[in-house]
Image (spheres, grey):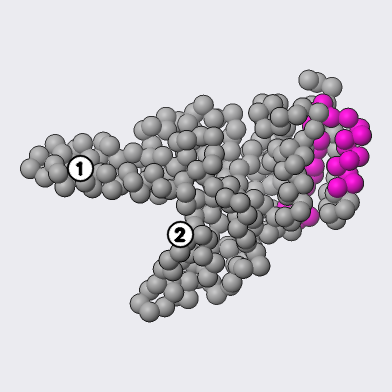
């Protein structure tokens, strides 16, 4: 059983972007369909505080409002690459992530290959998690809040790569879209806390997100085309791979002729 096998389902357009970028695109969490991305609540904690300190209600209410404002900005400061964790292809993922059933590809990889292929300059910045699913409204973990998703998304069985722009700003000279430079004393924080590697060649802003450079031949084990795609489409993808220098196997979906 390959428990660390992961898949990325891509339209033809997104596959074209992957090979032209020669890297992985990290989307801003605020752009996701799930508007509870990064949500957590400390409502219970503040209710308990109000019960214990009824004479301090105004200050507690202000603290709760500030905490909620910080939480609500988190999706603007976190960038995510989403992968499906499974031993085999998943028909729901094909249906939900590929609009044209006659086109599209899935990339097969392994968690350890992605992790070991991180650019050294970003090795302390990119974090990763297996998502946990449950009642998102009751999540109170603010330290790993993008690890949790509502149970309605459990079919995605998601593995995530995450970049926090504040961490990027603190540990590297790359600003990550932030206007302010974090300092420790009179030095930029990255000179004190970072690994000394400048990531300017490894990451760049693109649209609302970031592209992180990866050696695609090191992280992609196999590419498969959509279950309903034709042999002509497979050859079309093969030519794109050849032009991009991708050397991994290209195959029809294992679900072909089953749906």
Closer-to-camera residue (24/180)? 180
- Can you tell which mark lies on residue 184? none
Neighbour tally class for label 1: few under 14, some 14-19, many 20 plus, Cα within 10 Å? some
Percent position of residue 224, x then y: 80, 38
Residue under the point 23% across and 47% down: 63
Closer-to-camera residue (147/95)? 95
Neighbour tally class for label 2: few under 14, some 14-19, many 20 plus, Cα within 10 Å? some
Percent position of residue 121, x then y: 60, 67
Question: Is residue 207 left or right of 221 when viewed as pictured?
Answer: left
Residue under the point 73% across and 49% down: 18
Q: Is residue 197 magenta?
A: no
Question: Is residue 141 left or right of 94 when viewed as pictured?
Answer: left
Does 168 appear above or below 194?
above
Element type where label 2 sits in the image? helix
Quadrant in which residue 38 is drawn: top left
Question: In which quadrant will I find the C terminus?
Answer: top right
Furthest residue toward bottom: 186
Residue 24 shows up from this direction:
yes
Q: Is residue 237 magenta?
A: yes
Mark 1, residue position: 61
Does 251 appear above or below 99?
below
Residue under the point 88% across and 30% down: 230
* CB-based contact (under 8 Å), mark 1 and mark 2: no
The region drawn magenta spans 217-240
Element type where label 1 sits in the image? helix
Mark 2, residue position: 166
Percent position of residue 252, x then y: 85, 34
Question: In which quadrant will I find the N terminus?
Answer: top right
Q: Mark 2 or mark 1, which is nearer the start of the sequence? A: 1
Does 199 appear above or below 102?
below
């Amino acid at each position: 059983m390959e428990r660390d096998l992961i898949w990325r389902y891509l339209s033809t357009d997104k596959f074209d972007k992957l090979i032209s970028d020669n890297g992985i695109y990290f989307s801003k969490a605020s752009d996701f369909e799930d508007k509870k991305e990064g949500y957590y609540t400390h409502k219970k904690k503040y209710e308990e505080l109000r019960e214990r300190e009824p004479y301090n209600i105004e200050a507690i209410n202000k603290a709760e409002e500030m905490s909620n404002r910080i939480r609500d900005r988190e999706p603007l400061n976190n960038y995510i690459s989403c992968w499906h964790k499974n031993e085999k292809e998943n028909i729901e993922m094909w249906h939900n992530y590929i609009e044209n059933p006659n086109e599209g590809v899935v990339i097969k990889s392994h968690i350890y290959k992605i992790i070991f292929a991180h650019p050294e300059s970003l090795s302390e910045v990119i974090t990763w998690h297996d998502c946990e699913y449950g009642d998102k409204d009751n999540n109170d973990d603010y330290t790993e809040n993008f690890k949790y998703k509502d149970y309605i998304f459990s079919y995605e069985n998601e593995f995530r790569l995450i970049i926090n722009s504040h961490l990027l700003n603190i540990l590297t000279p790359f600003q990550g879209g932030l206007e302010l430079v974090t300092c420790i004393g009179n030095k930029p924080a990255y000179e004190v806390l970072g690994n000394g590697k400048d990531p300017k060649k490894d990451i760049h802003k693109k649209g609302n997100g970031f592209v992180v450079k990866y050696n695609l031949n090191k992280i992609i084990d196999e590419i498969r085309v959509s279950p309903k795609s034709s042999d002509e489409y497979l050859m079309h993808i093969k030519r794109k791979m050849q032009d991009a220098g991708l050397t991994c196997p290209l195959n029809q979906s294992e679900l072909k002729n089953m749906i």
